[in-house]
Every structure is written in C-alpha cells, then in structure tokens.
Image: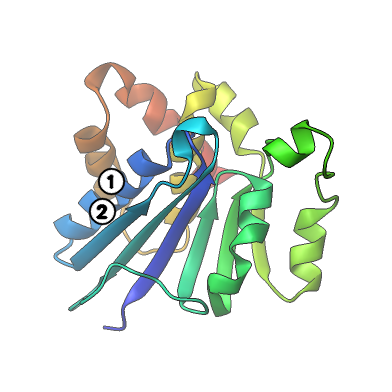
Amino acid sequence: MKTCNVMIVGVGGQGSLLASKLLGKLLLSRGYDVKVSEVHGMSQRGGSVVTYVRFGEKVYSPVIDKGEADYIVSFELLEAARWTEYLREGGCIITNTQQINPMPVITGAAAYPPDLVETMRASGFRVDALEALSLAGQAGSAKAVNLVLMGRLSKYFDFTVDEWMQAIGASVPAKFKEMNERAFALGANA
C-alpha cells in the first residue's frame, strides 16, 4: 500500500492536535504503520499549528515534504492557502471557511486576502470548503470544529462509522463523547 499523507493545519487552540490523535488511533486500530509529527510554532499565541499524519504498510518518517500531501485538513481559511504547496497533484484541501485574523491584519499592516476558496480553486486545487464553526455550534460547542472536519475527512476514506466512533470514544473525555459524535456526523453529512 502506498503511504497516505494528511496534513492538519490551523491556529493554536482550535483542536488540531486532538484531531491528529483521533486519526492516529483509528489508523493504528486498522493495523497501519502510523507516524505523527507535530509542529507547534507560536500555537499558544494564535500562531500556526501543523501536524503531519502518515500511514501505510511501512512508514519511515513522520515528515511530509512539499508536493506530498494527499489531504490538507485546515481549521482556518488562510492556513489552507498558506500550505497549498504541500499538496500533491490530485490531492484535496478540506477547509473550514472561518477566518481568524493574523497579527498583521489585526495591526492594520496587511489585509485578509479575499475570496481564498475561489483563488485556491482557480489555481487548480480541489477544495472541499464548509462552515465547520457553524456546524460545531449546532453540535453543542464551537470547540467541536475539529470533529466536524474529521467527519468531512471520513468521506474520503473507507473506514466504517463504527471505527470512527471507537476512535472518538478513545480520544475524548466521556462527558464530551456525544457532542463530538454529533459534530462528526454533521461534518460527514454536510
């Protein structure tokens, strides 16, 4: 089996590390060799957070190079655009349409780029964009964006819903399990 490469990108505090943990648990339960690497950057100050998840029959390195990502799962629109050079030809960007202003935009030194979904599509990228924040709110918490995006990612894999639910149960505290399952379902069915 060819190694599959998933990049999970976002802004600190959005739950991208939980998403990578959940995905890793699911892949291990299916018997894949899995490598996960976290690059935090200025995550605690709202900076970029990047996680690489690589899986296959045998994976030797956790690092994904430019042009190798099969999927980029992005918690924020500008982060999706920032990492497009890592996507392989024919790969897919799954992105939340939420916009979080980076410091240069907040200070007025720059403007948030307009029409990023259309710009990425016009550049030839396959983009699956959804309002994950709104769906997370419907599930019960704005913090469930990560599970909404994992639900959307699930549409691209052949794992069963039961397998995903087991991974959710093993990754989140019991008191948040139902809410996270709802968020996953909303993302999968959006």
Q: Label 2 to label 1, Cα distance in Å?
A: 5 Å
Quadrant in the picture for residue 65: bottom left
Quadrant in the picture for residue 177: top left
At x 50% / y 51%, what residue is drawn? 9
Q: Position of residue 119 (x, y in %)?
A: 81, 63
Secondary structure under badge 2? helix
Q: Around disc 1, counting alpha carbons within 10 Å, would you say few (fewer than 14), some (14 to 19), or many (20 or more)?
A: some
Q: Are marks 2 and 1 in contact (CB under 8 Å)?
A: yes
Q: Position of residue 134 (x, y in %)?
A: 64, 29
At x 57% / y 67%, what residue is drawn? 92
Type of amino acid under label 2: Gly
Q: Around disc 2, counting alpha carbons within 10 Å, would you say few (fewer than 14), some (14 to 19), or many (20 or more)?
A: many
Type of amino acid under label 1: Lys
Locate residue 100 relative to residue 164 in the image: left or right: right
Quadrant location of the N terminus? Answer: bottom left
140 is higher (above) or lower (below) than 92? above
At x 45% / y 46%, what residue is drawn? 151
The numbered dot on residue 126 is: none
Task: Examine the rendering and report whether any part of residue 101 can be seen.
Answer: no
Task: Examine the rendering and report whether any part of residue 9 can be seen.
Answer: yes
Secondary structure under badge 1? helix
Residue wearing tag 1:
21
17 is higher (above) or lower (below) than 180? below
Residue wearing tag 2:
24
